[in-house]
Amino acid sequence: MATRSFTTPPKSTHKTQTNIHDKPAPPDRRLIVISGPSGVGKGTLYKRLFDSHPDTFCLSVSHTTRGPRPGEQDGVDYHYVTMEAFEDLIAKDGFVEHAKFGGNRYGTSKMTIEEQTKKGKVVLLDIEMEGVKQIKQSSIAARYIFIAPPSVDALEARLRGRGTEDEASIQKRLTQAHKELEYSKTPGIHDKIIVNDDLDAAYKELEEYIYKPMDS
């Protein structure tokens, strides 16, 4: 399932403690696909990346057939379209991935990625396992990063620590986490697996991988 977009914050004068902070863009400008179980800290990591490099990265704005919620803006949170328009895009092979949840459709369009890339942005997708499978089958050039928890027990503790979900929801997320962790072990699926045990260490590993020279 495609996720909602993260709006890049105003440029900060604060510099992170890293030697590569001042680089305007990574040598490899392919789409970055980030996946991992719910609660593993994906959003925290890539939002930190956006804070450190506000003019370089953007999160793809997904299409959806659901209506906007209070405070959401078309083209910022989602591209809101009719079911007919969404299905027409499917028929025209306009999505790199799409899914249906709760009667609504969600998807990442090829045009959205192309438009942001033409603007000089490196596009990042925060996506679930099924979306990864679809992008793998597409012609889109991408780098795949999987964020893993130090253990399933640690992930469960994080989910419970949120205090926002009931037991049934937690168990559903843990079941899905087991599937995603098993899938991540498939050879050649992900280019980089980062264990988010320590946030600073995980971020350093993420940033260094994204900015590594293309021949390394």
Image (cartoon, grey):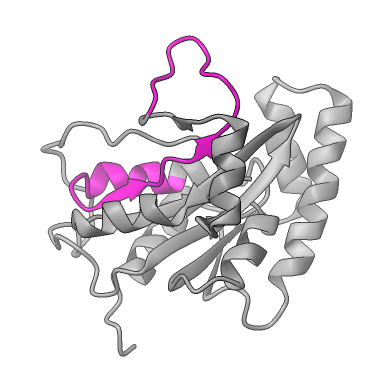
Which residue corresponds to the image point at 50% horizontal and 55% vertical from the top-left? 94
| Residue 110 picture location, percent across and down | 43, 57
Q: Is residue 113 left or right of residue 115?
A: right
- Farthest residue in the bottom direction? 215
Quadrant of image for the C terminus: bottom left
Q: Nearer the viewer, residue 86 or 113?
A: 86
| Residue 163 picture location, percent across and down | 70, 20
Q: Nearer the viewer, residue 144 or 19?
A: 144
Quadrant of image for the N terminus: top right
Q: Is residue 107 left or right of residue 121?
A: right
Which residue corresponds to the image point at 23% horizontal and 74% vertical from the top-left? 27
Is residue 54 among what the camera can see? yes
Which residue corresponds to the image point at 46% horizontal and 70% vertical from the top-left? 140
Q: Is residue 155 left or right of residue 140?
A: right
Q: Nearer the viewer, residue 121 or 111?
A: 111
Q: Tell me where the magenta segment starts and ends, as one range.
A: 45-74
